Image (cartoon, rainbow, N blue to C red):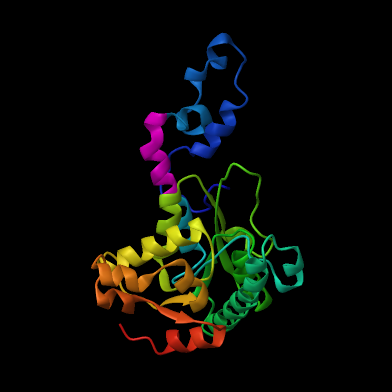
Amino acid sequence: MAAAKTRLHSLRSSHEDRETARHIPDTPQTRSPAYRLAFADDDFLCRDELRPVRLQLELLKPEMLLDEAGVRSTIVLFGGARIPSPDKKDTARTKTLAELSSFYEEARKFAHLMTKRSLETGGSDDVIVTGGGPGVMEAGNRGAMEAGGRSIGLNIVLPHEQAPNAYVTPELAFNFHYFALRKMHFLLRARAITVFPGGFGTMDEMFEALTLIQTQRMERVPFLLFGRAFWEKIINWDALCDAGTISPEDLDLFKFVETADEAMQIIDTFKD
């Protein structure tokens, strides 16, 4: 990232010293890892003792860049990476995944509708944010791009090779090491949360957000689960209530929807 054009002090820039340090004389002393500038030493920054610093950096970088991009509020779109687009459903690994491909189109349509509306007021509010991967996440970023707007992708480094989907706005494409910080950034600006069918990752994100709202650690926002049949088959919500492990009113924290239009209507009429 280039140095800021407006300096708040007259001291020498860290960017200048970093560049100067690349052209110092080659001696046994300068070749020593100890001589590297601490902030430009990747090995040092990756030490276990520096974990608090890395956590802070993963909090600060997306926050600062989103502020600089003028993103005030977001619409969160969680969902499975394995759900194919309808034109690829014949290649799905299971019959159920093929059937769930309809939610790819609903995610795409929802993001398109929300982004169109966002652009009417300048494009700083209700910006679509996804995990930046394939499947439903791709559909969300795709719908936003097709509407002519921006969208955010919060990717994470995984053991298998991956890259952000092609529809994420490049300057709003972020990469994370820590799942916890990634989930925090999903919710910091959230004005609504939508959850499409997915697997462990989607359920992890969904339940953390629900827990924060349930415990009043986060303000209540529209919380929409796309696909009642899927979610009621996967999770026995009533059994949790009957067992007393959640309260009856906790079931009011979310609503089931089937279509993008239905989701838009609920968000528009939401009252905390």
Which residues make up the magenta segment? 48-59
Q: Position of residue 260 (x, y in %)?
A: 56, 83
In this rendered view, identify the residue nearer to me: 142 or 205: 205
The total number of labels drawn is 0
Q: Position of residue 95 (x, y in %)?
A: 67, 67
Classify the position of the C terminus by image quarter. bottom left
Q: Is residue 9 magenta?
A: no
Q: Quadrant of residue 89?
A: bottom right
Residue 252: tell me if it is visible.
yes
- At 33% from the left and 70% from the top, the residue drawn is 239
- At 39% from the left and 69% from the top, the residue drawn is 236
Residue 125: tell me if it is visible.
no
Q: Quadrant of residue 271?
A: bottom left
Q: Position of residue 92 (x, y in %)?
A: 70, 63
Q: Position of residue 40 (x, y in %)?
A: 51, 32
- At 49% from the left and 56% from the top, the residue drawn is 200
Q: Quadrant of residue 153?
A: bottom right
Q: With 208 as the anchor, is 1 left or right in this view?
A: right
Q: From this view, report whether residue 27 is shown above or below residue 87.
A: above
Give the main secondary structure, helix, strand or loop, of the magenta stretch.
Answer: helix
Q: With 156 as the anchor, is 243 left or right in this view?
A: left
Q: From this view, report whether residue 181 is shown above or below residue 263.
A: above
Q: Is residue 49 magenta?
A: yes
